[in-house]
Amino acid sequence: MSALVRPREGRMIGGVCAGLARRFGISSFMMRTIFVVSCLLPGPQFLIYLALWVLLPNEKNAKSESTAW
């Protein structure tokens, strides 16, 4: 499993689904499909997506931070 970051390539809006797909080893299309279907159910899915967009670091920033230590 790779680190949970928003990748520079393969992102559509914020890169959250692409980052989660890479982390869990599934395709980005499948993760986006799961997210869209989950939005049809009641719950805070959209708010969680926005929170992850803000909290997850970009791939470039995560690499520079990890090499600093």
Image (cartoon, rainbow, N blue to C red):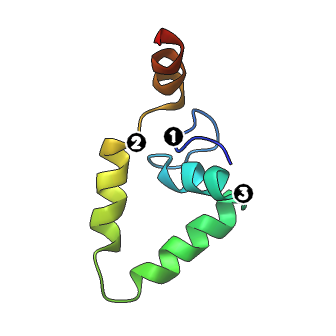
Separation of marks 3 and 1 at Cα, in angstroms: 13 Å
Q: Residue at x 40, y 42 (%)?
A: 56
Q: Which residue is mark 2?
A: 56
Label located before the other in sequence (1 or 2)? 1
Label at residue 34: none
Q: Secondary structure at mark 2?
A: loop
Mark 2 and mark 3 in contact? Answer it, CB < 8 Å. no
Locate residue 33, reporting x and y percent.
Answer: 59, 73
**As displayed, is residue 41 above or below residue 54?**
below
Q: Where 29 falls versus 58 (above or below)? A: below
Residue type at tag 2: Leu
**Picture coordinates of residue 63, whole percent (x, y):** 54, 21
Alpha carbon distance from label 2 to label 3? 18 Å
| Disc 3 element | loop
For disc 1, the marked residue is 5
Q: Residue furthest top?
A: 68
- Label 2 CA crowd tier, 10 Å (few <14, some 14–19, many 20+): some
In the rendered structure, the answer to whether residue 14 lies left or right of residue 17 reads left
The single residue placed furthest to the front in the displayed view is: 69
Q: Amino acid at mark 1?
A: Val
Residue that mark 3 sits on:
25
The residue depicted at 49 percent of the width and 26 percent of the height is 62
Rendering coords of residue 39 (x, y %) = 40, 79
